[in-house]
């Protein structure tokens, strides 16, 4: 689209998570007028760390926000997979992207603060929970729970795994339970029993459980995350300390000690869900991005990174295509094959034996890992 057309483009982004915030930045840089509508009254993130991959870091450079991200993250050279008792299984450098080979480890809260911090004041409107979206073909109307409405030429549904935009316009299929729980906490390096000695991500894998240690050097902390097979599909399950400690039985004693010492009030406990691939992500004036389009399990650490890639690809498509409908079609054709594959691979997190131990005779979403 021509720069003059982009300048007249009125964009409404629903959701101020990583995908929504990054899209707001990327589309503002094209000259579009962007408003972001977020349901929460205050935007907060779970206490846990993630790895920002080189392709995401490349987008931050392109958008001129790398310094803001670098100030609250630490570069990492590689990730390592070890057995439950610490025998090395695999060590791999982070996949490179062009000249960039570094992944940056970051606290989720610091990441969203950094992304929102580079948006102009007033762009994000909190307390706006989308209830309905009406697609008119050449634009769309949003209706919020607070009684207000908004019109836009382009609506970007960045409203996460339970997306209202997806449900209203593209697919009413419900999220799928993976058969796993995630228990996530951020602790001081001093409480990590000497297990954090550098800036690299380590995953310890035992029967039906994965334990991640993701250092956050700039904070003097480490993200301590457990993913365990569990048949309880309650989104926010009730779990005791003993339940969590039981998932790491047989692991390195230091990991068991860390788990025993967790302050349960600071542990984020949730059942893990993804969605089945959605056939179509867009109309001529509405498009899905991030988890709304392709929520995936976290085994590849690619969900937030994919949301960042979506934001960049949507801006590229708007610049390259002649019309808005053509841009949205181009965006889907570039991104969907990639995320379809990530959704598929990320369901292969466990061996057949592990799954049948926890789900005898049943078939959870998660498929056996090929070994
Ligand atoms: C246990 C676990 C570990 C993970 N680890 C990693 C990792 O290591 N690396 C990685 O890249 N990814 C990881 N992910 C995935 C990552 O968290 C998601 O992919 C990412 O948060 C998606 O970003 P998003 O902006 O699309 O959606 P979200 O982060 O869900 O943001 C959606 C936003 O929309 C708002 N919203 C929702 N509904 C409405 C509405 N009706 N109206 C207005 N606003 C609304 C929400 O409040 C929220 O702010 C992990 C996920 C889990 C569960």
Image: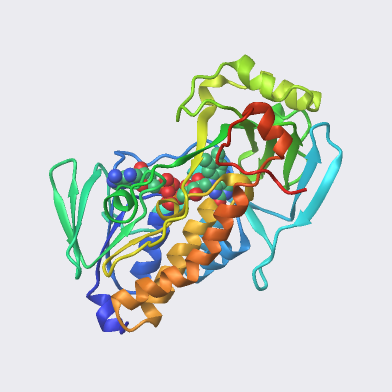
Q: Where is residue 10 in the image (x, y as percent from the top left)?
A: 23, 68
Question: Is 262 on the left or on the right of 90, as rendered?
Answer: left
Q: Where is residue 136 in the image (x, y as percent from the top left)?
A: 17, 64
Count of marks placed on residues: 0
Q: In this view, does 257 lie above or below 201?
A: above
Considering depth in this image, is 49 or 171 the residue closer to the camera?
171
Q: In this view, does 224 lie above or below 262?
A: below
Residue in the image at 61% along x and 58% along y: 53
Residue in the image at 26% along x and 83% along y: 4
Q: Can residue 316 be seen in this view?
A: yes
Q: Where is residue 270 in the image (x, y as percent from the top left)?
A: 50, 31
Question: Is 99 on the left or on the right of 240, as rendered?
Answer: right
Residue in the image at 51% along x and 52% along y: 304
Q: Is residue 107 visible?
A: no
> What colour-coding does the image apply?
rainbow
Q: Position of residue 224 (x, y in %)?
A: 64, 34
Considering depth in this image, is 264 or 269 the residue closer to the camera?
269
Considering depth in this image, is 258 or 356 the residue closer to the camera?
356
- Which image quadrant is residue 57 in? bottom right
């Amino acid at each position: 689209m021509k720069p003059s057309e982009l300048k007249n483009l009125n964009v409404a982004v629903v959701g101020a998570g990583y995908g929504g915030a990054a899209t707001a930045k990327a589309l503002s840089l094209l000259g579009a007028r962007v408003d972001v509508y977020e349901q929460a009254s205050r935007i907060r993130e779970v206490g846990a760390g993630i790895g920002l991959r080189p392709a995401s870091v490349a987008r931050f450079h392109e958008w001129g926000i790398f310094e803001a991200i670098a100030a609250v993250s630490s570069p990492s050279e590689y990730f390592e997979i070890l057995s439950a008792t610490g025998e090395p299984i695999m060590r791999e450098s982070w996949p490179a992207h062009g000249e960039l080979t570094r992944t940056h480890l970051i606290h989720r809260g610091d990441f969203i603060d950094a992304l929102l911090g580079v948006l102009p004041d007033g762009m994000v409107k909190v307390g706006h929970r989308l209830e309905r979206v009406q697609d008119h073909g050449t634009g769309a109307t949003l209706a919020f729970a607070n009684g207000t409405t908004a019109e836009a030429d382009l609506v970007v549904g960045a409203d996460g795994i339970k997306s209202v935009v997806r449900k209203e316009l593209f697919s009413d299929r419900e999220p799928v339970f993976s058969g796993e729980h995630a228990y996530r906490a951020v602790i001081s390096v001093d409480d990590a029993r000497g297990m954090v000695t550098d800036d690299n991500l380590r995953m310890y894998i035992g029967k039906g459980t994965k334990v991640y240690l993701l250092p956050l050097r700039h904070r003097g902390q480490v993200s301590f995350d457990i993913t365990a097979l569990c048949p309880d599909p309650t989104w926010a399950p009730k779990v005791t300390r003993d339940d969590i400690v039981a998932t790491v039985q047989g692991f390195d004693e230091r990991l068991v000690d860390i788990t025993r010492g967790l302050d349960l009030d600071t542990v984020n406990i949730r059942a893990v869900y993804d969605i089945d691939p959605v056939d179509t992500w867009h109309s001529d004036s509405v498009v899905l991005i991030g988890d709304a389009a392709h929520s995936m399990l976290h085994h590849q650490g690619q969900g937030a990174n994919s949301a960042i890639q979506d934001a960049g690809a949507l801006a590229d498509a708007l610049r390259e295509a002649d019309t808005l409908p053509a841009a949205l079609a181009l965006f889907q054709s570039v991104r969907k094959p990639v995320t379809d594959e990530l959704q598929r691979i990320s369901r292969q997190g466990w061996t057949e034996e592990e799954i049948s131990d926890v789900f005898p005779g049943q078939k959870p979403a998660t498929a056996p890992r090929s070994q």
